[in-house]
Image: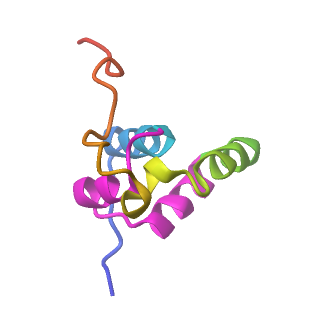
C-alpha cells in the first residue's frame, strides 16, 4: 500500500501541467511526485472543472506518448525543449 502524497501548491500545479502535456508519460509523474496513473486521474478529477476533466480524459486515453510501454523507442524526451517559460 502506498502512502498518500501531500503536494504543495507549486507541486500540484506542476503535476497538473505534466498531466496535460502530451509527451510527459505517467511514469515521469510517478518518478517525480510518487503518483501513479490512477492517482493522477483522481487528482485531476478533484482539481479540474468537470468539463475540463472530461476533455483531459479524452485527450490522454490511449495516447501512446502518455504510456511509456506504448511509446516508440525513438521518443527519448518527455517534453518539448521550448515548452517551459523563461524565468
Q: Residue 35: percent from the left, percent from the top?
A: 36, 63
Of residues 85 and 75, the one drawn nearer to the viewer in this rendering: 75
Residue drawn at x 44%, y 37% is 17
Q: Is residue 63 magenta?
A: no
Residue 40 at what x, y percent from top left? Answer: 47, 59
Does the stretch in magenta take in 41?
yes
The answer to whether residue 59 is above or below residue 27 is above
The C terminus, quarter of image: top left
Which span is picked out in magenta?
22-47
Instruction: Name the one closer to the observer, 59 or 3.
Output: 59
Q: Residue at x 51, y 40 (%)?
A: 20
Residue 33: x and y, percent?
28, 56
Instruction: In the displayed orientation, state which residue is furthest to the top.
Output: 86
Which quadrant of the view contains residue 11? Answer: top left
Q: How is the image coloured?
A: rainbow
The residue most toward the right is 51
Q: Position of residue 24 (x, y in %)?
A: 38, 44
Given residues 65 and 27, the one toward you in this image is 65
Q: In the picture shown, does residue 6 fall above or below 51?
A: below
Q: Main secondary structure of the magenta part?
A: helix
Furthest residue in direction bottom, as rendered: 1
The residue that appears at 36% across and 72% down in the rendered structure is 4
Decide which of 45, 24 is in the foreground and name it. Answer: 24
Amino acid at each position: 500500500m502506498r502512502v498518500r502524497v501531500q503536494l504543495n501548491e507549486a507541486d500540484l500545479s506542476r503535476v497538473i501541467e505534466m498531466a496535460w502535456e502530451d509527451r510527459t508519460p505517467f511514469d515521469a509523474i510517478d518518478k517525480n511526485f510518487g503518483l501513479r496513473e490512477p492517482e493522477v486521474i483522481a487528482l485531476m478529477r478533484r482539481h479540474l472543472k468537470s468539463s475540463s476533466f472530461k476533455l483531459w480524459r479524452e485527450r490522454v486515453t490511449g495516447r501512446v506518448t502518455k504510456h511509456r510501454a506504448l511509446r516508440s523507442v525513438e521518443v527519448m524526451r518527455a517534453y518539448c525543449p521550448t515548452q517551459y517559460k523563461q524565468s
